[in-house]
Amino acid sequence: MEIITRFAPSPTGYIHIGNVRSAIYPYLVARQSNGKMILRIEDTDRARFVDGATELIEDTLEWLGINWDEGPIVGGQNGPYFQSERQEIYHKWAKKLIESGRAYADPTTPEEIEAYRKECTEKKIPFLYRNFRPKNTPEWKPGIPLRFKSEPKEYAWHDEVMGDMHSGPEVLDDIILIKKDGYPTYNFAHIVDDAEMGVTHVMRGVEYLSSTPNYLAIYEALNLKRPKLVSLPHILAPQGNKKLGKRDGAKSVTEYRDDGILAEAMMNYLASLGWNDGTEQEIYTKEELIRKFSLDRIQTSGARYDETKLLWLNGQWIRKIFTEQGAEALYARTENFWPESAKSYSDEYKIKVLSIIYDRLKTLSDLRNMTNYFFEDPRIDLDMIINNKFLKKISESEIESLLKQTIAKLTDIEKWDEDDLQNALNELLLETGKKPAELFSLIRIAISFAPFSPALNLTLNVLGKETSLARLNSVARSI
Ligand code: GLU
């Protein structure tokens, strides 16, 4: 049987990092079995609809490398893929339930419902709508909510993550299927859509687990085969005490992209948040995830969001792309992350800069504050050198003579390549009797004013002889 999964987001804003795993896992399951992945936009809650949110969802998925076989943009035989355009389909299925006596139009007013609720609170009994079901119900027409007619019974089912589940009659109720505005509720629409679209694996957040018995009752009333149910545990705030929310620093996926996180790292991080293949492996390509992912290794408890881990993985991915695909492949990802001053420089020069700095980057946006001195003169003078905390131990007169010796030595270099530069620097160490931590810090600070930089010979090499000497001379002249 072909495996068909789906991601069914509601277009209520951007895709939050805590939600996007509900797209990644169905994608992996569909791809590993040569099945199908559907994207369905659940936009029937018109009050929460946000303009542009669908496009943001599509962009996010595309960036992550998650493609879908049916859905917006690509179409498919089971469309439309926006729930708001599927009214007739829901009404057709609603009528089946009315005909079999399992749904009724409910004329009860919100005030009456409130009064029933209050009555239960006062009597300290649970409020179950089915105990207040109206005796006479009108014919169903738009403007009147349609409710499911529940039957108190027990259910047993298997959740692919949570295991064998069981529920009693007290959780079953007359839930609303179609609202007053004619739009279906999530509870009804997703069942109809999953059935019409042939979805075999319903993978979604664990928050839907408590409503599952009501869904099972609807499957049964409609004579539908239950799909496999897969409840994905929550992603928790770093403290582990609650579901990850905006206030815990959870950003939208596109914000991470704009901050210089690579799609590969994001996919890798989120897929392994609450799942592992039983080994110590931490870096997974998408292809490996597709091969190795399995539902039975999803953990049942929530997984803590850990930004430090994400940044670490991102650094690993930056190195991986550089070493496996080459400097140009990594450079192609960096367009939006260079400092303003880099604009007028050639790609060739920026690739050189990237090649000596990539292994220090955690995010691509680190380029913005770690590479300025390759593109603009940091205009360093003696005061800046004397007051520098790394150079406190060197006296002013010593700084002067060290700079002069350095200038003389470097001026004599002919080839200005990495090796000649390293030789010259080694000779300087011998001649001055200084430790690298002192002499090299002085030179580094005089040419870059950066607290850290790539190896000195590499930095000098990329800056070029003219620029390097001009900077050293300008500091020496200020003495
Ligand atoms: N539209 C629901 C949500 O965004 C989808 C739940 C599901 O995947 O069925 O939470």
Image (spheres, rainbow, N blue to C red):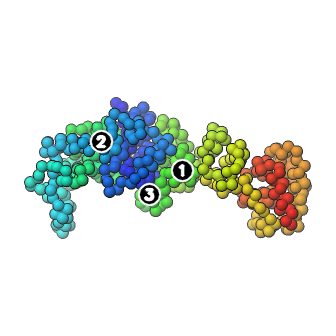
In the picture, measured across the screen, residue 367 lies left or right of residue 441, that is left
Residue 164: image location, x then y, percent? 31, 45
Label 1 and label 3: CA atoms lie apart by: 19 Å
Q: Residue at x 33, y 40 (%)?
A: 80
**Figure quadrant of residue 264:** top right
Q: Secondary structure at mark 1?
A: helix
Q: Secondary structure at mark 3?
A: loop
Q: Which residue is mark 1?
A: 257
Question: On screen, 151 above or below 35?
Answer: below
Residue 22: image location, x then y, percent? 41, 47
Q: Which residue is mark 2?
A: 193
In the picture, measured across the screen, residue 340 lies left or right of residue 127, that is right
Label 2 and label 3: CA atoms lie apart by: 29 Å
Amino acid tagged 3: Leu
- Residue 295 appears in view: no
Classify 10 Å Cα crowding around label 3: few (below 14), some (14-19), many (20 and above).
Answer: many
In the picture, measured across the screen, residue 405 lies left or right of residue 72, that is right
Q: Quadrant of the N terminus?
A: top left
Looking at the rendered structure, which numbered label has been put on residue 407? none
Looking at the rendered structure, which numbered label has been put on residue 244? 3
Classify 10 Å Cα crowding around label 2: few (below 14), some (14-19), many (20 and above).
Answer: some
Farthest left residue? 136
Q: Residue at x 36, y 46 (%)?
A: 41
Amino acid tagged 1: Arg
Q: Earlier in the sequence, mark 2 or mark 3?
A: 2
Residue 226: image location, x then y, percent? 27, 40
